[in-house]
Amino acid sequence: MGLSSEAINKLQNAFDDACADRDKGLPGVVGIAVGRDGKELFAHAAGKRGFGSEESMSLDSVFWIASCTKMITGLACMQLVEQGKLSLDDVAQTEKLCPELKDLQVLQPDGKLIAKKGGITLRMLLTHTSGFGYTFFHDRLRDQSKPIGYDEFSGHLIDLIQPLVHQPGEGWQYGVGIDFAGFCVERVTGMSLNQYFQKNIFKPLGLDNISMFPNMQMKERLAYMNSRAPDGQLSPRDHLLHRPLVVQSQDDISSCVNSGGAGCFAKPREYCQILATLLNDGRSPITGAQILQKATVDAMFQNQIAQFPNFGRQGIAAAKPDLTNAIPDLYPGKNQGWGLTFMISDGPTGRSNSTAHWAGLPNLFWWCDREKGVAGIIASQVLPFADAKVLGLWVDFESGVYSGLS
């Protein structure tokens, strides 16, 4: 399987054109697509390292991948489920590993807090049905935390211990639950989440440029963070996930939350090797390492929330407009589901009905189509989320890959 030269040229031009306007286009972007054999079907970097930079974006550039981390945390959890060390549906185990969950309160529409009625399971954490939210996606949760507020990217545990926005298991709300799934991994293994990832996922897959605490070489290739004003004008901004980039001593690193929900930095082409491993039923097509059994991968790609068929259409608010635009529908697919850490949906690009996909806050979007054997990621560093120009390029990218396959 490969892409025609015509398709590759067309896609390269689309990426370059998206970055042509230095003020209101994209500052810089990387697109990678891979097949089931792990070979790259398409790899292109366009634009600059960031707004105002004269340094070209590169295929070796490192991005904060934010919520693209969630899928990796799901792999870690499911490895431990396979080993019998974690259970998806054992409330007692989950709340023993994470005692912070036991006494959480539930935020009501009138702003009052009431006790939660039931326990939280690992499956709820992985499927966003535990009741956790994000303050930047939820007006009431944002307002409840005034005047101090919650900063989910501070690196401090206290910022993640938030009220629930619905009773456990009674709805779907995108939030910090997968951070607590990551804490389950840490506390059952005695390793930091980053250490666990390195030993059990990244090293077996031969990946050297994914980490929650980038080394100096990675930081030297870090793409700049950018902001877009309502009129479309770009400007530079400080990095949102600041603390992991400045910690130096081991004590500083040890005290910083390893965010299973948003903590990784990565080269996009290395992230695609994780996607290729999912395409290949849990075995790396490059190194041969089996990090998950096929049955486990199958389970991750099954809809876990059939009781909430319209979860994606309930809308996400622009509660913090510097971080996100409003999102009326998570994806324009006819059939929407949620697997173990990612969305599952068909769509208008040519993807199959069971395609997994998700995103990262600074406008990164990945997809993984096991049926058709193709996956990819488009990576930028632009805030707020749901940037129209990145979304448009993602649709063109994914569509161009499918139409160009031979």
Image (spheres, rainbow, N blue to C red):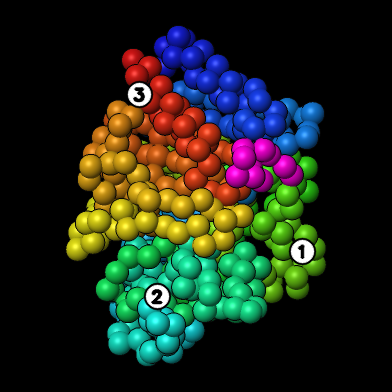
Give how far across and how far down residue 34 sits, in percent.
44, 30
Nearer the N terminus, badge 3 or badge 1? Answer: 1
Q: CA distance from mark 3 to mark 2?
A: 39 Å
Look at 32% across and 65% down and name the residue there: 172
Residue receiving disc 1: 247
The reply to whether the C-beta atoms of the residues labelled 3 and 1 are less than 8 Å apart is no
Q: Which residues are magenta?
A: 227-236
Label 2's element? loop
For badge 3, the amino acid type reads: Tyr
Residue receiving disc 3: 402
Look at 62% across and 40% down and name the residue there: 231
As drawn, which residue projects farthest toward the front? 231
Q: CA distance from mark 3 to mark 1?
A: 42 Å
As drawn, which residue projects farthest toward the top? 6
Residue receiving disc 2: 165
Residue in front for this viewpoint, 222 or 94: 222
Q: Within 10 angstroms of label 3, few (less than 14), some, or many (20 or more) residues?
A: some
The reply to whether the C-beta atoms of the residues labelled 3 and 2 are less than 8 Å apart is no
Label 1's element? loop
For badge 2, the amino acid type reads: Val
In this rendering, the label closer to the viewer, 3 or 1: 3
